[in-house]
Every structure is written in structure tokens, then in C-alpha cells.
Image (cartoon, rainbow, N blue to C red):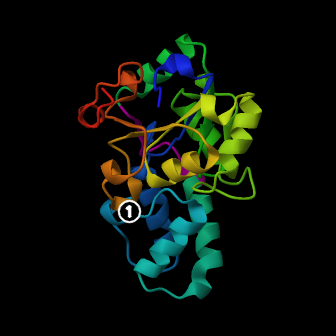
Amino acid sequence: MNLDLAHFDAVIVDLDGTLVDTLGDFTAALNAMLADLALPAVDAGVVETMVGKGSEHLVRSVLRHLRASDALYDQAFDDYQRHYGVVNGLHSKVYPGAVEGLRLLRDRRLRLACLTNKPTDFARQLLTSKRLDVFFDPVFGGDAFERKKPDPLPLLKTCEALGSRPGRTLMVGDSSNDARAARAAGCPVVLVTYGYNHGEPVQEVDADGFLDSLARLDSWTSPVGAARGLG
């Protein structure tokens, strides 16, 4: 696999766990939701293992973790959405190297899209609050298509929007969701080592490369990547 950036016409970048550490936002919104339901709070360590498969999965996972009734889901989801809209971006931070990596891709004249399982409105709000929106057109969330990652449909639709073939479109993410979707869509995929990945070691995921900073997207010299012969 040729992972030189010259091989690509476009790059699709995940949001949560890849560009922005949003664990604080998730935890704050979930705990506000749980307070509304008179349920105990959860800590960030628990939430971290549940992030990445969309808001619906996150809310259901928290309720299951607390052994709460499934009958609470509709109210819980509505409460979560309302609270998340308030805290979105307040307890999150851009990862070191993320801006430098996006500038590098832009300077290489690669077309950039942000593709996340977070709802599109929340994704756009977060990108704007962190001044990352200037790098992306388009932005697609988990509600943009009929299915979410790890299904390949969102990547294939994003490639269409970018006007690029999957084989010449690099996926950059932090989890097995991103890698599985990319593999199924025919996109090369690189994962960062600092994201969430459902509480599992990201180095065990089938990917073409691993990076400890997006600022290294043109050098492939991350320790994990080098260990796999990708440096």
C-alpha cells in the first residue's frame, strides 16, 4: 500500500477522538441526562468505552450499564440531545497536532471532508467553536445517511461528494469503526493512537498505519507505525 500523500486526491477525517477530545462533553451531557432521570452519574472512564457508534448507541449503552429500564430510552435520548446542545464544545479540546495536520493536508491541496457518527448539527457546531470548520467542506454526521460507520455507506457517499475514488481517498480515524468502514469501502485507512476505540487497543485494529499525531501525516514516523514498517 502506497501511503504517500501524493497517492491521494482527498482525505476523510473523523471528529471525536481524532481531531477533538470530546469525552468531557459526552460525560457532562450524559450526567445531566441521568440527573433528569434520577439515576446515578457515570464517570468518564465508563463513557470512553461507549463513544463512537452514535448518540443512540451511547445513550442505550449508559442505560444498560446502570441496568435501567429500556422504557426510559425515549425520554433519556431527548434529554441527552438537549443537554449536549448546551455543553457541545465547552468541555472539549483540540488534540495537539490536529491543526498542523489539517494545514498540511490543505497545503497539499487535498480535498477534505469531516465524517463522524455525531449528529451533523452538533458536528458543525463543534468544528466552528474550535475553528476547524475552515478546513472542511463537506461535513457529514451520523444522521446524514441511512447507516453509520462501520457501514461503508457513509464513506462511499462522502467520496461521491468529494469527487474522489475510494482507492485515492484516505480515511483518518481513531477506532475500529473507521477502519472497518474504510476497508469495506475500499479506502486506505490510518488510525491515531490517542483516541477512544471502545476501550480496546487500537494497534490491534486492521489498518494501514498508525500515528501519534496528525502533524506527522506526511512522514509516517510514529513509533507504532514504524514498528509495523510504515515509518
For image coordinates 46% across by 73% down, the residue present is 62
List the residue tagged with mark 1: 49
- On the image, the x and y values in percent for residue 74 come to 65, 77
Residue 69 vertical position relative to residue 169 in the rendered view, above or below: below
Tell me the crowding category of disc 1: few under 14, some 14 to 19, or many 20 or more residues within 10 angstroms, Cα based. Answer: some
For image coordinates 51% across by 66% down, the residue present is 58
Q: Which residues are magenta?
A: 85-95
Residue 57 vertical position relative to residue 138 in the rendered view, above or below: below
Q: Is residue 223 left or right of residue 140?
A: left
Answer whether residue 120 is visible to the viewer in this image. Answer: no
For image coordinates 42% across by 59% down, the residue present is 27
31 or 104, which is in the foreground? 104
What is the secondary structure assignment of the residue under circle 1? Answer: loop
- On the image, the x and y values in percent for residue 106 come to 56, 16
1 or 89, which is in the foreground? 1
70 or 31, which is in the foreground? 70
Q: In which image quadrant can residue 107 be found?
A: top right
Q: In which image quadrant can residue 191 be found?
A: top left
Residue 94 vertical position relative to residue 43 in the rendered view, above or below: above
- On the image, the x and y values in percent for residue 141 come to 65, 47
Work out which quarter of the rendered image holds the C terminus and state it.
Answer: top left
Q: In which image quadrant can residue 48 be found?
A: bottom left
Residue 6 vertical position relative to residue 196 in the rendered view, above or below: above
How many labels were placed on the picture? 1
Is 94 included in the stretch rendered in magenta? yes
Answer whether residue 44 is visible to the viewer in this image. Answer: yes
